[in-house]
Amino acid sequence: MNREKSIDFLKDYVGRVCLRDPELGIDGMDLLGNMRGQLQSASGGGLRVRASRRAFTLIDVLVTIAVIGVLIGILIPTLSGVNEAARRVACRSNVRQIGIAIALYSDQHDGMLPSSVFLPFDSIVAREASQPQQMIMIRVNPSMASVTPATSPAMTGWDGLGVLHSSEFITDGRLFYCPSHHGENSFRVYAQAWSQGAMSEIAGNYHYRGAGPSSSGPGAPLTNVMYRISPQHSALVSDGLRTQSDYNHRVGSNVFRADLSVVWVPDPRLMVSEALPEKKEDAVSASPVENAWHFFDTSEIVSDVLGAGSINRAALAR
């Protein structure tokens, strides 16, 4: 109400001044008309006041950053789980192809499994000196040939699973390496040795058993003839078992069995990995490896998204 009175007073005052003082050289009626229009616009449409924009404060920015951090913290474990699942599938494919190569090799060698200098079958004395903890080796130092029989793989350097490569059942050396490996034996470390063919040692990421029990009874002797292994679900290939860093997945392992199946054996309580030595220099006892094979033989299996994945021997014959 006060604003309207002020506007009326202003209009009346301007009109009187302009009309009474013609020396100003201003047409009072025109000026009054212009001002009246402006004042009516201001009074009729309301005074337009530009609202000030409120900027982000430091607290707003910090809260936003905190929310983004929480969301990232929620998503990272999920993404890591997805990546590990993909690596596990790729690992399983490697183990499957190694298993196929073992089956083909066995069929062509009267059921015999690829031999290893670390698991001799020449005599009882030699067998007692076996070193199953070293059977992640694919190629050994040729100097070992001086202490092994002339028929040993050490004469050519290729040993255990490496015999599958020298026999051309597996031509791509990358199949012997797990994408989840977190130790010191990645394919990158041995890439030059693979490409140059030098007679140097090569380690892989998968452990080779080289033999299996001949019966299901306790203390049954081992046999390196594949069709004599009993029970048939005995494990032959798994993650590396020499040290904790050689055990690729920690919470379980892809395992190839004598019945030609490839299965995932879970170990959520880390019974296998925690029993292995931490350093390569401490891998002097065969007990952790033997206990791990027993664990794989007797554990319940859990198939992943690909299923149990048994290998069809008839398909191999074709």
Image (cartoon, rainbow, N blue to C red):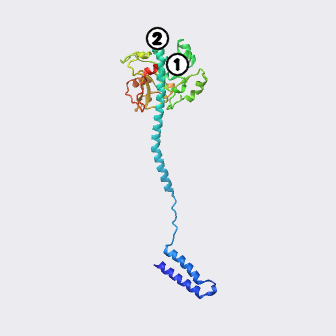
Picture residue at 50% right of the left edge, 76% below the top: 43
Picture residue at 51% right of the left edge, 80% below the top: 7
Query: In the orientation shown, which residue stands out farthest toward the front?
Result: 318
Residue occupied by mark 2? 123
Q: Nearer the viewer, residue 40 or 259?
A: 40
Q: Nearer the viewer, residue 79 or 318?
A: 318
In the rendered structure, which amino acid carries the disc numbered 1? Answer: Val
Residue occupied by mark 1? 163
Circles 2, 1 touching at the beta carbon (< 8 Å): no
Establish if 68 lies above or below 236. below
Picture residue at 48% right of the left edge, 50% below the top: 66
Q: Nearer the viewer, residue 203 or 178?
A: 178
Q: How many marks?
A: 2
User: Residue 305 lies in what quarter of the image?
Assistant: top left
Gap between marks 2 and 1 measured at Cα:
22 Å
Residue 159: image x %, image y %?
A: 52, 19
**In this view, the mark in front (2 or 1):** 1
Residue 153: image x %, image y %?
A: 53, 16
Residue 208: image x %, image y %?
A: 47, 22
Judged from the image, the secondary structure of the residue bearing numbered disc 2 is: loop
Residue 187: image x %, image y %?
A: 55, 28
Judged from the image, the secondary structure of the residue bearing numbered disc 1 is: helix
Is residue 153 visible in the rendered image? The answer is yes
In the rendered structure, which amino acid carries the disc numbered 2? Answer: Ser
Establish if 3 lies above or below 185. below
Q: Earlier in the sequence, mark 2 or mark 1?
A: 2
Is residue 129 visible in the rendered image? The answer is no
Quadrant in which the N terminus is drawn:
bottom left
Q: Nearer the viewer, residue 303 or 292?
A: 303
User: Residue 301 lies in what quarter of the image?
Assistant: top left
Say few, some or many: other residues with alpha carbon within 10 Å of mark 1 (under 14 / 14 to 19 / 20 or more): many
